[in-house]
Structures are given as structure tokens and as C-alpha cells.
Amino acid sequence: SAFETFDAGTTTNPSFNYRMNAELGVRNNNFGTYKFQNSTIYFSYNGTPIGETLVPNSKAGWLSTKKLNVVVDLSSSNLPSNSQLGNDLDTGVLKFNAQSKLSGKVTLTFMFKKKKSTNMDCIITIDLAHRAVRDINCN
């Protein structure tokens, strides 16, 4: 992940506006092609929505990973004034959640189709001093 725009406020005016370019991987562990539908990744900070991005429909081949590039704008504009954003900015670390569900079909041995879906639930840790993603932890 890389940041195209990286603006963060101070403790007295806690805010952020980021544009993140991210590469996603959809791993297909099946012995058949996985075709998935459009989906949305929702980003939140302490439960408050801060951005979303579309994952376009595509397919991942047999036992392979389909790589996709997405762009997302993340903003603190919806955060309540009593959020802990100022404290997090002081520590130099921000943590966001990213959640999504992909639904589609796996075609096994060119004949059988089986519906499959997968959930993504990740915590993304951003190092403010280095303007970089420090860690991504997904379940």
C-alpha cells in the first residue's frame, strides 16, 4: 500500500485525509476458477465509517491469487468530536478496520458450479512518522 495524499492534523485539530493505493489479493484454494461479483471494502476507525472502495468483479484461476489494485479515500470528517483521534495522533500510530465479503461461484472440473463466499476482516496500522502501513492483520 502507498499513500498518494497524506494529511494529518495536530492534537489541537485532530483530523486526517488520506488517499491510499492498495494492492489486494484474492487467493483461490480451489481446483477450479473462482468468479466473484463486485464487492465493497468498508473502512472504519473505532466503529465510525471513514471510507469505502469498490472491488470489481473478476476471477481467480485454479490454485492461484488474483491481484487487484484499488484506491480509497479515508477521512476523519465523520468522526465525533470526542473521538480518541487526538491521542492516537500523539502516539504516531493510527489503526483502521477494513471489512468486506466476496461472493461468487467456483467452477469445478469445467462442469460443476458451487457458490462460495469469503469474508475479510483486517486491522491496518499506519505509522504516521514514516507515512506508511506498518502492519496488516487479517482474520
Image (tube, grey):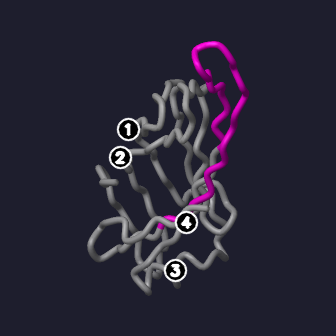
Q: Return the x and y of residue 52 as percentages of the image width and height.
A: 56, 44
Q: Quadrant of the C terminus?
A: bottom right
Q: Gap between marks 1 and 4, in whole Å?
A: 19 Å
Identity of the amino acid at label 4? Answer: Ile
Q: Nearer the viewer, mark 2 or mark 3?
A: 2
Q: Gap between marks 2 and 1, in whole Å?
A: 7 Å
Question: Where residue 123 is drawn, which disc sits there?
Answer: 4
Secondary element under disc 1, as helix, strand or loop, is strand
Q: Gap between marks 4 and 2, in whole Å?
A: 16 Å
Q: Return the x and y of residue 69 as percentages of the image width and height.
A: 38, 38
Is there a contact, CB below 8 Å, between mark 3 and mark 1? Answer: no
User: What residue would you read off at disc 2?
Assistant: 21
Identity of the amino acid at label 1? Answer: Asn
Q: Quadrant of the N terminus?
A: bottom left
Identity of the amino acid at label 2? Answer: Asn
| Sequence-first tag of 4 and 2 | 2
Q: Which residues are magenta?
A: 101-124
**Outermost residue to the top:** 111
User: What residue would you read off at disc 3?
Assistant: 86
Identity of the amino acid at label 3? Answer: Gly
Q: Nearer the viewer, mark 4 or mark 2?
A: 4
Magenta stretch, main secondary structure, is: strand
Task: Check if residue 29 falls in the magenta segment.
Answer: no
Q: Is residue 56 above or below residue 127?
A: above
| Sequence-first tag of 3 and 4 | 3
Quarter assignment of residue 24 = top left
Residue at the location (61% across, 33% down)? Answer: 39
Residue at the location (49% across, 43% down)? Answer: 27
